[in-house]
Image (tube, rainbow, N blue to C red):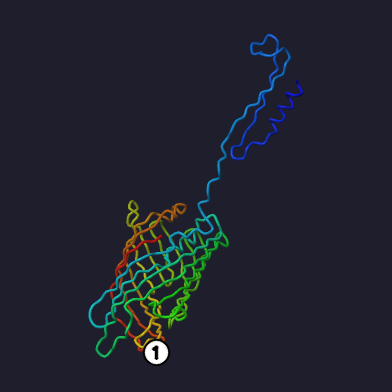
Amino acid sequence: MLSICLLHGLLLGQAEAPRPSPTVTTIEVTTSREGSPESRGAPGEISVRATETHTEAVAPPADSSSLFARPFFADRHALSWFLDAGPGRFNMIDWESRPNGDHLWWLGRWPSCEDVQLHAMIGFGIHWWAGPISRVGDPAPELPPRVFDLYLDTAWAQRWTDRLTSEIRVRPGLYTDFRTTPPDSFRIPGQAVALFQVNPELYLVGGVEHVQRNDVHLLPVGGFLWQPTPQWELRLVFPEPKIAYQLSSRHHVWGYVAAEYGGGRWTFKNDDGKSERVEVSDYRGVFGLEWRDDYFSKLSQLPEKSASFIEMGYVFERHVRFASGVRDFEPKPAWMIRFGRVW
């Protein structure tokens, strides 16, 4: 009898617990003594009692960062008006999505626990054109009323060391009025940049941007990011420098001045039924207001945050150039109003 009880207890102790709910088996051996109040068996009898305790399996917390997670504050989506009056004007309305220059701060400080970030999505933009309107002695070219952007936005960001990071971003797609064949309207603009951390407040930036326009194909990317105090952010990087100052810490309002090289290249079908490539380019000086959380000091919370902005700017050195040799046109300067969101 004693050997059977011990064998029974041993088997219970070695029994494997079910995987969904791990079981802890406790073997309690009690020797009854004569005269003991708790004695229920015969004197000297050994009893074996096994108790089972179930514990729920707790899954490890999900990683907040994924290999295919979208880089935070990577894109800005905006609606813009370019307005002026009189001969020589070229008014436009743009709805566009494009990389936001402030994502360089994210790239330099890299809140992700992974060394690689991959990103891909479909992008779309539309540009309404009114004009150009000719001046005396300067006839205006014929342009379509609207052109479109349809592209695949891909990015590869890499952290090489604690101080060195890089990003390659390519946007192959169709930039056209959708009346031309894809080979003529296909473009591959992109950008490759690297950042080196000098100290926690200063980063050096270098790289190249492939704009693939009629006259300009490549632009250098260079400068530095500097945050001397929590209230100042200096993104002095060509071709999109920006200086921002915190106006209200309570409401997360920032004011900024910025500059950019604007425009693009599109293919359209002219009045003769032939494909024509046109480049629209300009320089822009911008003053803006931005409502955002303090995402530079709370990097771990970035994925849930976005920002809204409104800008007013002056657009000058405007050019309309054609690849076929059609006479170029220089519209007069214009004012710009733009608002949108960044996420």
* Between 66 and 39, the one nearer to me in the picture: 39
User: From the viewer's perspective, is residue 283 above or below residue 106?
Assistant: below
| 326 w.r.t. 149: above or below | below
What amino acid type is highlighted by mark number 1?
Gly
Residue at image x 62%, y 37%? 18
Q: Residue furthest bottom?
A: 137
The total of numbered circles placed on residues is 1
What residue occupies the far top of the structure in this picture? Answer: 35
Task: For label 1, count other residues whose C-alpha is less than 10 Å away and answer few (under 14), some (14-19) or many (20+).
Answer: few
Quick check: 340 left or right of 121? left
Query: What residue is disc 1 on?
Result: 325
Among all residues in the image, which is located at the extreme right? 3
196 vs 180, left or right, is right
Task: Return the x and y of residue 174 as percentages of the image width and height.
Answer: 44, 75
Q: Examine the image and state in which quarter residue 46 appears.
A: top right
Q: Quadrant of residue 309?
A: bottom left
Q: Nearer the viewer, residue 198 or 189?
A: 189
Q: Secondary structure at mark 1?
A: loop
Question: Where does the image place residue 11, in percent across and percent down from the top left?
Answer: 71, 30
Q: Where is the C terminus found, in terms of image quarters?
A: bottom left
Question: Which quarter of the rendered picture does the N terminus lie within?
Answer: top right
Q: Measured from the top left, where is residue 118 in percent x and y?
A: 52, 62
